[in-house]
Amino acid sequence: MPTDPADTVLNEIEAIGKRSFIPSIGPVKGKILAEIVKKTRPKRILEVGALYGYSAILMAKNSPPGVGIVSVEKNSEHVRIAMKNIKRANMEETIKMVEGDGTSELKKLSGSFDLVFLDAEKTEYLAYLKAVEKNLHKGSVIVADNVGIFKDQMQDYLDYVRNKGPYKSRTVETLLEFSDNTKDAMEISEKLVESSMELEDGGQLTAFVFSFSWALFIVFEKVTVRMPWPLKQLLIGQFPGEFEAQRQVIRLRSNELLL
């Protein structure tokens, strides 16, 4: 049976990590991340911090068909190596590499993401989340690595997802990548409310529906104004007082939403 090219690349990166430490999540944390991906079944994934492409390939391998992954990495050499590994894993159509600093590149992204994986500069985790928060919907999951060993460098992030922000969050204790005794942890946070982008779009849609309803109402009034009252009453299905009240409600709601 032919070997999956993705498995070959993952095994090679793991072998490098065992010989000399590299800050890649490794197989132990990789199992945790893979389970989150399988449970979430994301259509779009955002990764901040690619290194050699291990986690992006792992997430792609465990995602449903058709998933799209955007991986942001600021180190040009890491981008080169990651792209090479992604191509060897036959996943160049699934994983898109973006070279640049996360705090600036994330602000340029459009569309929504179902899953976000943070594994870059630890002091910038909150900045990364804030930059991409507009692209998260209710139910989006954010996985942050190294929240145990580097917790002092990301207290603002942990306080936000655990206490202040619109998230429910839990900590999964594990071991540092490629270590047998150094403790570490991953923070898994789920967004509880819709993004500002979705709320804005919803408000615009509601305003459109009300304004369109009001326009139809005016046309209906003009068409029926010369009708004999019994026929008009039959079409309206209400008494004159109720009809006028309904007209006032539609007018008020339309005006409020279009201000």
Image: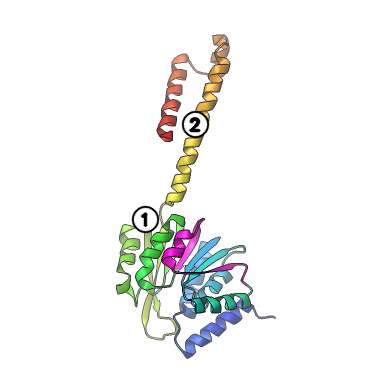
Q: Which quadrant, please, contains the C terminus?
A: top left
Left or right for 180, reference 64: left
Per the image, the residue denoted by label 2 is 211
Residue 166 - label: 1
Q: Is residue 4 above or below residue 66?
A: below
Q: Is residue 233 above or below residue 87?
A: above
SS state under label 2: helix
Q: Earlier in the sequence, mark 2 or mark 1?
A: 1
Q: Position of residue 7 (x, y in %)?
A: 59, 79
* Farthest-out residue, right: 1
Q: Find out whether residue 115 is within the magenta segment.
A: yes
Mark-to-mark CA distance, 2 and 1: 32 Å
SS state under label 1: loop
Callout 1 crowding tier (Cα within 10 Å): few <14, some 14–19, many ≥20: some
Q: Position of residue 222 (x, y in %)?
A: 55, 17
Q: Find out whether residue 257 is within the magenta segment.
A: no
Does any portion of residue 41 appear in the rendered image? no
Q: Position of residue 215 (x, y in %)?
A: 52, 27
Q: Is residue 89 above or below residue 197?
A: below
Q: Position of residue 82 (x, y in %)?
A: 54, 77
Residue 121 or residue 160, whichever sits in front: 121
Residue 194 or residue 27, whichever sits in front: 194
In the rendered image, which quarter is residue 156 located in? Answer: bottom left
* Numbered range of the magenta stretch: 91-117
Q: Which quadrant, please, contains the N terminus?
A: bottom right
Residue at 42 percent across and 58 percent down: it is: 133
Q: Amino acid at mark 1?
A: Pro
Q: Is residue 198 above or below residue 163?
A: above
Q: Amino acid at mark 2?
A: Ser
Does any portion of residue 88 appear in the rendered image? yes
Q: Nearer the viewer, mark 2 or mark 1?
A: 2
Residue 100 or residue 60, whichever sits in front: 100
